[in-house]
Image: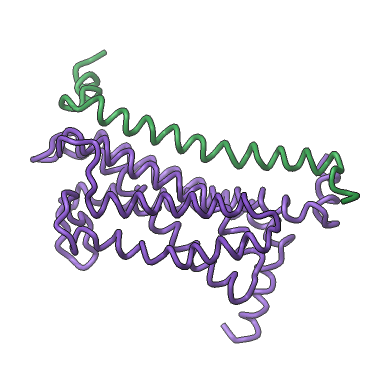
Amino acid sequence: MSHSSAMRWLHRFGSLPYFYRVSRLWARCLALPGLAMAGYGVYAGLAIVPPDYQQGDVFRIIYIHVPSAWLSLFGYTAMAVAGVVILVWRLKIAEIFIIAAAPIGASFTFLTLVTGSIWGEPTWGTWWVWDARLTSELILLFLYLGVIALHQAIESPRIAARACALLSVVGVINIPIIHYSVVWWNTLHQGSTIRPLGGSTMETDMIIPLLIGALGFTLIFGWLTLWRMRAQLIWRERRSRWVTRMIHHER
Amino acid sequence: MNDSWQQFLHMGGYARYVWSAYGIAAAVMLANVVAPIVALARIKRRIAREEFVDD
């Protein structure tokens, strides 16, 4: 892509009416394959793959726990990237993204903690332990909630977005800590199941549905974020001509 | 109900753990889908009432 066409693309993408118009189609394109793949992953995890030779059927919680955990990290990292864009270029679409993604990321972080806790009780004999992995994931939930609270507390949307951006950028240090916590500290939490460079600790038949499911949930994350962005966008632009016109035209 | 279905629901004795984890996940996902649809509709209604024309 040449420099000028890249700039043109950026300009169009940053154009809010354009984004609002096309994001509906993008969301639909993500929703169908996302639901199908996530559905397959969960179905295979619950009904097709054999029980784990050590943990039995309780290990099936992995098919919701690992995709949630992946999205809790992915969501915050994406917010930190948007945070840099906000702090450096003040791009409005990035401001809208950060606040749209935060509640979804928070919900997946919550799911990670809850499903992990339910899995921990029969496997470790405890619902909760102040282990490095669990504690850093709990801090991630507080970071997400902090971004949401900042956005609600500051009235000016642009100042609020800068505050949220700053917290996202600073808080992203927690992401590698979560990822490597099982390596750096001797934790109760088991080591990584999926190792892209080889040596995964799971059978191929068990890991493929997990990967398909994780990809499916990632597409769902994108779909949900786009819908939240659309709502956030017309709220931010509620006084602009194109929004009021469009809405009166729809009725 | 046949045996294999019951065996599936039984989850090797871990039924309450597995099904509560997936039940909570289903509830969270449903809320994630419904919330933006409701929010968008509500915002559109407020804008349609022209609440923001003068401020």
The percent position of residue B38, horizontal first and vertical second, equals 64, 36
State the image coordinates of residue A231 (x, y, percent, origin top left): 67, 48
Q: Percent position (x, y) of residue A206?
A: 20, 47
Check the image and report above or below for A64 versus A74. Answer: above
Q: How is the image coloured?
A: by chain
Classify residue A37 as left or right of residue A47.
right
A197 or A184, which is in the foreground? A184
A218 relative position to A83: left or right: left
Spot the residue most to the left: A54
Quadrant including the N terminus of chain B: top left
Q: Residue furthest bottom?
A: A3
Q: Residue at x 25, y 33 (%)?
A: A47
Chain letter of the green region: B
Instruction: Report whether residue A29 is seen.
Output: no
Tell me where residue A144 appears, x and y as whole percent: 47, 52
Task: Count the marks.
Answer: 0
Pick the front one: B50 or A1:
B50
In the image, the chain rendered in purple is A
Residue visible at 26% across and 31% down in the picture = B18
Residue placed at 87% from the left, 43% from the top?
B50
Residue positioned most to the right: B54
